[in-house]
């Protein structure tokens, strides 16, 4: 007996395959990002129920969604990435079902629309899973289902379908203001759906849309109240503050260009400048393979459907309005629509409009259906490539996070409670100082129970002069409400550190005259060095900090730099010199030559003056501008020891031209 899958099963299976290819290939190598960390920390240490009060001052209807999902899924990045994959698959299937309800006579078009939405290339935040699955994709799933049930109700004439559509609309629109504008899309699709002259279609549309309009008005009143209430007033409504027609016009054109055209070929723009790079070659190779794989499948499954110019124009017009309606909430808040950044999360509300526009444009310009299918296959393949390109960015970010956390653990095995960690900024894209605060507390306080938060990381670049970090004077109070817990300390409880891009973490210390050694750093960070108190680092704890989710990496250059610096702090120069020997055997060439200075101190304080001198000359050979830093280190060596090597130290200083 020959076994054949039904058409529905085959198409559902293809949605699953595309989901895995676009989002799952690098899944095990991705993790937590941005607000994922605070949310994961809340789940682990305070429990899922904490999300209800945590979101009460901000987006109160999001709290129950977070409570439900975090009750089911542990705060492990692998589980959340798998869950994100499932939600993506469900969005693809739901979009297919919804478009089938809207265009029941255009089965092929409905399926193509679902595939375009599945790999929609304008939205790159899929991998910030714990945050964006709850904050955007689940409400969006509700909204898609609401659209589908609206049109299902028109065919079945069942009141229950309308009630379900309204309930789903409530679940989609109230949790987040992202979807405030897309309710208007339902109006435009209804206009396309109905037959007859414009007056008849408009009358039918208003009658059907009325209950949804009332819910939308209720949501608008709620948002108006809540935007003006308490801490939620963090986003001021630009439209109500300072109307600027030129600004809104340029932003409108920007949204139309990006959503209707640019994003569909964005992956080519991003990969062509680095065409020979492995990531670019892999991305473009995946695009080509996906196109070759998809085209014959979609051609075989396509049903014959006559092109309709009027229908195509209607889709284009509705798509344009839908793009603008989707942009409305973020535009009103004065937030940019910047691609390949956290701001492209606003593209989620533009996804429907962008898809409709592309469907209409291809239908209008291309009469031959097979050619249309080939073009759609190419667009879907480009979308797959874009999402793989995005996944690789998040893979690198996760890898860099692991490097950062382990360097912190190596250099600072434990910290006194109420420590403020200060730095200018971290060399990473998808995490902020307050994002880092959660994993830092997880690392250094794994036994935490409800109390004040024990640690906080603050960027001088962002926080100085604000309410959190008013100044860099001593004993200035620092307080911050971290969702439902608080942090309290002072600037005198600070440890200041510096982490350069592609470099190693250094704890800065005024007693080592680091203001001079690192004088080229941003002024506010140099100013903060006087506050740094390395004695808050517990150098020999009973239980050393260990980053969660990251196995300890191979001991590379930064391992030896951080561990040697820790040994120097302890005065254990024998161990430090041994670490220096091992590090130099790697024949590494650090991007910042000042990293060698840790080992200069190690050798010199261990009595190995010749080795310290040779290494100092290496530093100067690489970068003569480091002379001031080298001489400062040797002045420290001269002041602090080693005993019995005073003449050798002085001779070394003179040979380095440090006597001036």
Image (cartoon, grey):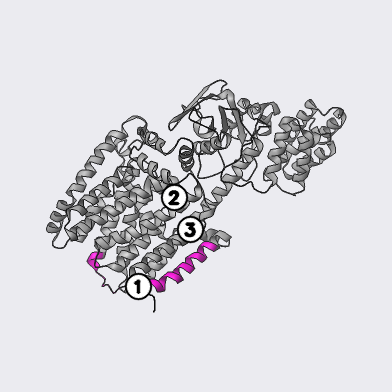
Q: Can you say whether 230 is above or below 343 in the image?
A: above
Q: Which residues are magenta?
A: 282-311
Residue carrying label 2: 125
Q: Tag on residue 24?
A: 3
Q: Secondary structure at mark 1?
A: helix
- Quick check: 119 left or right of 200? right
Farthest bottom residue? 1
Query: Gap in Å between the C-alphas at discs 3 and 1?
Result: 25 Å
Residue carrying label 1: 301
Question: Residue at point 19% right, 51% down?
Answer: 209
Residue 607, how many percent across, how many down?
A: 84, 34
Q: Can you say whether 519 is above or below 349 in the image?
A: above
Q: Which quadrant: the C terminus?
A: top right
Mark 2 surroundings within 10 Å by alpha-carbon count, few (fewer than 14), some (14 through 19), many (20 or more): many
Q: Secondary structure at mark 2?
A: helix
Q: Tag on residue 432?
A: none
């Amino acid at each position: 007996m020959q076994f054949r899958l039904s058409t529905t099963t085959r198409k559902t299976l293809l949605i699953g395959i595309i989901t895995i290819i676009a989002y799952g290939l690098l899944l095990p190598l991705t993790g937590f990002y941005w607000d994922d960390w605070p949310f994961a920390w809340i789940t682990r240490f305070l429990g899922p129920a904490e999300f209800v009060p945590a979101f009460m001052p901000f987006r109160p209807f999001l709290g129950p969604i977070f409570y439900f999902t975090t009750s089911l899924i542990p705060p492990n990045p692998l589980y959340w990435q798998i869950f994100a994959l499932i939600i993506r698959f469900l969005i693809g299937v739901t979009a297919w079902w919804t478009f089938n309800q809207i265009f029941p006579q255009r089965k092929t078009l409905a399926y193509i629309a679902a595939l375009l939405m599945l790999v929609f290339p304008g939205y790159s935040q899929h991998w910030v899973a714990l945050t964006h699955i709850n904050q955007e994709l689940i409400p969006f799933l509700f909204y898609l289902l609401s659209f589908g049930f609206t049109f299902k109700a028109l065919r079945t004439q069942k009141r229950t379908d309308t009630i379900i559509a309204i309930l789903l609309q409530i679940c989609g629109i109230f949790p987040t203001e992202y979807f405030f504008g897309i309710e208007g899309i339902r109006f435009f699709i209804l206009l396309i759906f109905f037959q007859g002259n414009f007056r008849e279609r408009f009358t039918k549309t208003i009658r059907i849309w009325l209950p949804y309009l009332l819910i939308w008005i209720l949501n608008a009143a709620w948002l108006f109240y809540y935007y003006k209430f308490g801490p939620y007033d963090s986003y001021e409504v630009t439209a109500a503050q300072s109307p600027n027609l030129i600004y809104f016009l340029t932003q409108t054109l920007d949204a139309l260009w990006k959503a209707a055209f640019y994003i569909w070929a964005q992956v080519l723009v991003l990969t062509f400048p680095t065409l020979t790079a492995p990531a670019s070659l892999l991305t473009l190779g995946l695009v080509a393979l996906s196109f070759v794989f998809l085209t014959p499948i979609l051609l075989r499954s396509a049903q014959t459907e006559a092109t309709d110019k009027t229908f195509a124009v209607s889709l284009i017009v509705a798509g344009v309005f839908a793009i603008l309606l989707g942009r409305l909430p973020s535009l009103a808040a004065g937030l940019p629509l910047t691609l390949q950044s956290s701001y492209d999360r606003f593209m989620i509300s533009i996804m429907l409009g962008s898809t409709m526009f592309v469907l209409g444009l291809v239908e209008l310009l291309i009469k031959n259906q097979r050619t249309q299918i080939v073009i759609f296959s190419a667009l879907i393949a480009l979308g797959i490539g874009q999402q793989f390109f995005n996944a690789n960015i998040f893979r690198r970010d996760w890898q860099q996070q692991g490097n950062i956390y382990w360097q912190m653990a190596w250099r600072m095995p434990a910290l006194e409670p109420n420590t403020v960690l200060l730095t200018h900024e971290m060399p990473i894209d998808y995490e902020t100082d307050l994002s880092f605060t959660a994993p830092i507390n997880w690392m250094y306080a794994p036994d935490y129970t409800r109390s004040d938060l024990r640690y906080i990381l603050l960027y001088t670049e962002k926080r100085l002069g604000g309410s959190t970090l008013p100044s860099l004077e001593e004993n200035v109070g620092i307080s911050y409400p971290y969702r439902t817990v608080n942090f309290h300390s002072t600037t005198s409880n600070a440890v200041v550190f510096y982490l350069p891009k592609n470099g190693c973490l250094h704890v800065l210390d005024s007693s080592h005259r680091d203001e001079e050694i690192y004088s080229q750093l941003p002024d506010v960070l140099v100013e903060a060095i006087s506050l740094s108190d390395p004695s808050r680092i517990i150098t020999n704890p009973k239980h050393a900090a260990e980053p969660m989710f990251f196995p300890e990496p191979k001991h590379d250059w930064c391992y030896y730099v951080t561990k040697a610096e820790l040994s120097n702090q302890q005065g254990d120069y024998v161990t430090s010199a041994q670490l220096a020997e091992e590090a130099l055997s790697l024949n590494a060439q650090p991007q910042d030559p000042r990293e060698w200075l840790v080992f200069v101190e190690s050798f010199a304080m261990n009595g190995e003056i010749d080795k310290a001198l040779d290494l100092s000359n290496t530093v100067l050979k690489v970068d003569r501008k480091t002379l001031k830093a080298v001489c400062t280190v040797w002045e420290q060596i001269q002041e602090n020891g080693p005993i019995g090597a005073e003449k050798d130290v002085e001779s070394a200083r003179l040979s380095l031209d440090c006597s001036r």
